[in-house]
Image: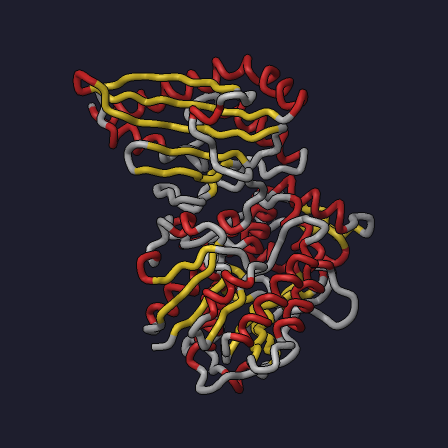
Amino acid sequence: MSVIAVTGTTGYIGGRLVPLLLEQGHQIRVLTRNASRLRDVPWRESVEVVEGELADPAAVRQLCHGVHLLYYLVHSMSGSGHFADEEERCARVVAGVAEQESVSQLVYLSGLHPEGDLSEHLASRVKVGEILSEAKTVKTLILQAGLVIGSGSASFEMVRHLSDILPVMPAPRWVRNHVQPIAIRDALYYLAECSQLDQPVAGIFDIGGPRSYSYADLMKIYAKVAGIREPQVWALPVLTPRLASHWVNLVTPLPRSLASALVQSLQHDCVVSNRRIDDLIAPPEQGLTDYPHAVRLALEKIATDTVETSWATAHPVSAPAQELPSDPQWAGRTIYVDERTVTTCASAEQVYTVVRRIGGETGYFAWPLLWKLRGLMDKVSGGVGLRRGRRSRSQLSLGDVVDWWRVEALESNSLLRLRAEMRVPGQAWLEFKVSKIPEGKIELIQRAVFFPEGLLGRCYWWAVYPFHGLVFTGMIRNIIRQAEAVQS
């Protein structure tokens, strides 16, 4: 069948849409800033990858060449003061190039919104849709979705953690506003069906679940499905959106920038205004998934460790300009390293199996209270803390999130390197290398590497240095102990 281009494939929805399009028999071309981030996805060898930025006309032209359908699934959830300008610039480049390359259909996933004043993020989504629709020879189909409920989605994780942790939740008055969530399976259904349309279509279509709920109802229904105590939600007139976003950041895995974007969007009723989409795309055969069932499906995915994509993987909090330099490149730079080495009779596979379970429910093998305290400090300062967890308890892929780390390098049975996304005055990595040495033994090298920024960075290193002897010594010792226990 024809070639389809997809942007946002390292994102939560794009990463799930691609395999559906492949099942339909389409040839898929994707755009990503860093092709290595797609190395471990199961569909990598079935797609053509273009490496580049949406703001780069040359990269977008390569993406759109010979394409009849383009999916635009990119939206910034950062706290950058310039994100709206950046989004408009990307949209103008895509619209212009799509027209030049004779793309006939463009599909854009936007958000449900009311008329009138909108939050900055919702307003930006609307503006992007308007810019994409300006392409005269390209039909732009805009799907407007509300909260997407599925395993790993930011909206679901926000509801889940607020309900799991807080028996009583103080909330703004607008927690009573109505939203119309949509199950991830239904959002993907509508997106995939856009590729089956007989001819290009232009227009704006709302998509959502069967009914709307107040946000307080979402948490209470989640609690009932999850089998936990129903939280008491107190609507307080003094809780501003800014305070609420700090509260959500502290209690849930969401970083402050993402929490702020979600909280701001809840200040309005966001419900489906009409069902015109039914005239274009028939509803799913099994019917639209109601919210309680969507919650149940999401919890089943988490319980069976089969979460395909996660908001955290798609939402880098920070990233250095380059990966960890090799040792020879450290010359002339201020660098602090805590390196520890242990040998063992356990196999490389046994050692690496233990190492790759790091973080999430497993923790860090030693001094869990110290890790939790450091995570709380990071959360209070607006960082991500330790609650992001892992997409999978048993598997790791390049780009995956592990609490406040991101997987930067991954080689089976030999290397795992994690880049820190916590708030630190510098750049930090935690690395594990497994290698064979003479006499048939295995060596595990554990390194914490820190590039400080200014005097504050140097002071930070020496302030936490006394704890390294406890934490890092206990970590490597217990990793080897668990690997040898498997061997025995």
Foreground residue among 449 and 236 = 449
Q: Residue at x 63, y 59 (%)?
A: 217
Q: Quadrant of residue 373?
A: top right
Going by the image, does 344 lie left or right of 135? left
Q: Residue furthest right?
A: 238
Horizontal and vertical percent for residue 368? 49, 25
Going by the image, does 140 lie left or right of 345? right
Asked whether the viewer can see residue 226, the reply is no
Q: Which colour assignment does the render follow?
A: secondary structure
Going by the image, does 42 lie left or right of 196? left
Horizontal and vertical percent for residue 313? 49, 48
Q: Residue at x 55, y 73 (%)?
A: 210
Q: Residue at x 58, y 43 (%)?
A: 317
Foreground residue among 424 and 57 = 57
Q: Is residue 324 above or below residue 92?
A: above
Asked whether the viewer can see residue 414, the reply is yes
Q: Residue at x 48, y 13 (%)?
A: 469
Going by the image, does 215 lie left or right of 488? right
Horizontal and vertical percent for residue 15? 44, 58
Q: Is residue 159 above or below residue 418?
A: below
Q: Quadrant of residue 407?
A: top left
Q: How many marks?
A: 0
Screen quadrant of the C terminus: top left
Foreground residue among 184 and 317 = 317
Horizontal and vertical percent for residue 235? 75, 53
Screen quadrant of the N terminus: bottom left
